[in-house]
Image (cartoon, grey):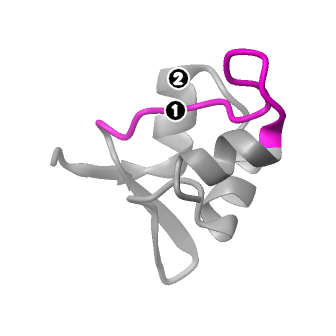
C-alpha cells in the first residue's frame, strides 16, 4: 500500500475528472478511497479500472465477476 493522496491529485495523475472519481468513491468502486472531513483520500497505487466493458461483457456482469 502506497501513501494516501487527495482524490484531485489522483485524478490528475490518471487523467480523469475529479467529480467522476468522487462519484466512484461514494459508490465504493474505488476500494482504497476514504473520506476525511470534506476531502477524499486514495492510495496512490489504486488501479483505475473502467467497468463499462471488459472483454465485450456487459457492465453489470463484469462488476459481479470483479466482486463489486
Residue drawn 68% across the image and 23% down it: 54
Q: Quadrant of the C terminus?
A: bottom right
Closer to the chain start, of discs 1 and 2, is 2
Residue 9 in percent (x, y) is at 47, 38
Above or below, 67 against 9 in this view is below
Q: Is residue 47 left or right of residue 23?
A: left
Along the viewing direction, whichever of 67 and 50 lies nearer the viewer:
67
The circle drawn on residue 65 is none
The extreme top residue here reads: 55
Residue 7 in percent (x, y) is at 51, 49
Q: Quadrant of residue 23?
A: bottom right
Q: Is residue 54 left or right of residue 2?
A: right
Q: Main secondary structure of the magenta part?
A: loop
Above or below, 34 against 44 in this view is below
Q: Are there few (<14), some (14-19), or many (20+) residues within 10 Å of tag 2?
A: few
Residue 32 in percent (x, y) is at 38, 59
Q: Secondary structure at mark 2?
A: helix
Disc 1 + disc 2, Cβ < 8 Å: yes
Q: Secondary structure at mark 1?
A: loop
Residue drawn 58% across the image and 78% down it: 38
Q: Are there few (<14), some (14-19), or many (20+) residues within 10 Å of tag 1?
A: few
Say which residue label 2 marks. 14
Residue interval drawn in magenta? 45-59
Amino acid at each position: 500500500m502506497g501513501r494516501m493522496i487527495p482524490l484531485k491529485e489522483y485524478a490528475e495523475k490518471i487523467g480523469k475528472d475529479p467529480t467522476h472519481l468522487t462519484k466512484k468513491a461514494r459508490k465504493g468502486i474505488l476500494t482504497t478511497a476514504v473520506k476525511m472531513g470534506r476531502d477524499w483520500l486514495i492510495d496512490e497505487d489504486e488501479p483505475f479500472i473502467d467497468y463499462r466493458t471488459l472483454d465485450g461483457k456487459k457492465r453489470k456482469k463484469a462488476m459481479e465477476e470483479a466482486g463489486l
